[in-house]
Amino acid sequence: MIKKISIAYLTPEMYVSGFHWDQDVESSYQKEGRIPDWKTVELIKKRGVKELFIDTERGVDVEAGVSQDQIESEGDQTFAAYADEKPAVDKKVSTSEELIKAREVHSRAKGMIETAMQKALHGEDVDVDGFKELANDFIDSVTRNQNALACLSRIREKDAYLLEHSINVGVLMSILGKAMNLNRQSLFENVLGAILHDIGKILIPDEVLHKPGRLTEEEFGLMKKHSTFSRDILVKSGGLPQASLNVAYQHHERLDGTGYPQGLNKDTISLEAKMAAVVDVYDAITADRCYHKGLPPTIALKRMLEWTGSHLDKDILHTFIRAMGIYPVGSLVELTSGKLAVVIELNAQDQKQPMVKAIYHTKFKRFIKVELIDLTRKSTGEQIVRPSDPVNYGININDFLS
Ligand SMILES: [Fe+2]
């Protein structure tokens, strides 16, 4: 049985199965495995971990704790309440039309971030004006139809995490900021900061940045410097508004004061950094990394609800869920018939009825002829039964998004 326990109950010989629950993937402190000794227990405590998940079949059990099943069913109830809310989604042009522009913006963004990182690595300034234009292009695209960039953000290439993460956090910040009705200037400043928030990671040595195993105390200390490095690179480049700098410098702060680099709290973290924390965590936990498989988007949003209060701001996450939909674009869902389908377009009226592309049949365990299904049409007889994990069926979502 998988169960959640308080850190106070952690002992050697327990088996931590926590990596799917890891809200700060950069630390990878919850790498799955047996706890070898008290030194490791102390190390995990020092990292500020308050709760973690153990597998009682693979290691020592303890009477305290709550089972995963119980948490899941409670989470499902909370989540169901969100499903009935009207989505915060905009669509002024068709998705296929917007995809043409979005593809251009997306590929330009990749090239620009790559160049900026190389410049930062060599102590040169970043082309701030170019990024200002890019931030505006992100916002314009999302305003016309958010499905296009959201869809491109789900396509992941191997070994391109840092690049894609920078773009995705920018796209997600555009979607969130719009849903929060920020004025254009604030939206622009936040998106600009979001695209550049992790640029300081280029100064972290590769063997630490891409280390598959648990980071040592020293390595984690180094990793934690990246947000300060980001701020320093951006200040040196000049011309960035304060809010953009706040996004870069404060995106790892937590409401309860256990974040870094300053240990700010709910009263002192800026609004833009609270927003950045939500979109940063979402993109990080839904991506495949060298040390863990990405979570399906719906499951990721549910997990994030558990982290409100201590880490993430609840109201902001709430708006983010309404903006992404409980079944975000690019997620896999199971339909009434047993078919699996990829969500390709949100429905502005009802989160539970997006446009989907059916691709696989769970009963016959095989791929089927791709079929576009509009779930608002009753005649299809289809509804979403549950979110699904492509990993379980050997499905590569990338193949069905472009
Ligand atoms: Fe970061």
Image (cartoon, rainbow, N blue to C red):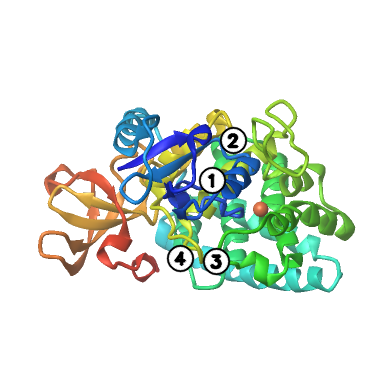
Label 2 and label 1: CA atoms lie apart by 9 Å
Label 3 and label 1: CA atoms lie apart by 17 Å
Q: Amino acid at mark 2?
A: His
Q: Position of residue 22 (x, y in %)?
A: 51, 48
Quarter of the image with the N terminus in it: top left
Q: Nearer the viewer, mark 3 or mark 1?
A: 3
Quadrant of res 127: bottom right
Point out the tag, 4 or 1, that comes first from the N-terminus. Answer: 1
Residue that appears at 65% across and 73% down:
111
Residue 23: numbered disc: 1
* Element carrying mark 1: loop
Q: Which residue is mark 4?
A: 155
Residue 58 lies, with reference to residue 79, above or below; the image says below
* Element carrying mark 4: loop
Circles 2 and 3, Cβ within 8 Å, touching? The answer is: no
* Element carrying mark 3: loop
Point out the tag, 3 or 1, that comes first from the N-terminus. Answer: 1
Point out the tag, 2 or 3, that comes first from the N-terminus. Answer: 3
Answer yes or no: disc 4 within 8 Å of ligand 1.
no
Quadrant of res 47: top right
Label 2 and label 4: CA atoms lie apart by 27 Å
Whether residue 145 can be seen here: no
Q: Badge 2, how many Cα within 10 Å: few under 14, some, many 20+?
A: many
Circles 4 and 1, Cβ within 8 Å, touching? The answer is: no
Point out the tag, 4 or 3, that comes first from the N-terminus. Answer: 4
Q: Nearer the viewer, mark 4 or mark 3?
A: 3
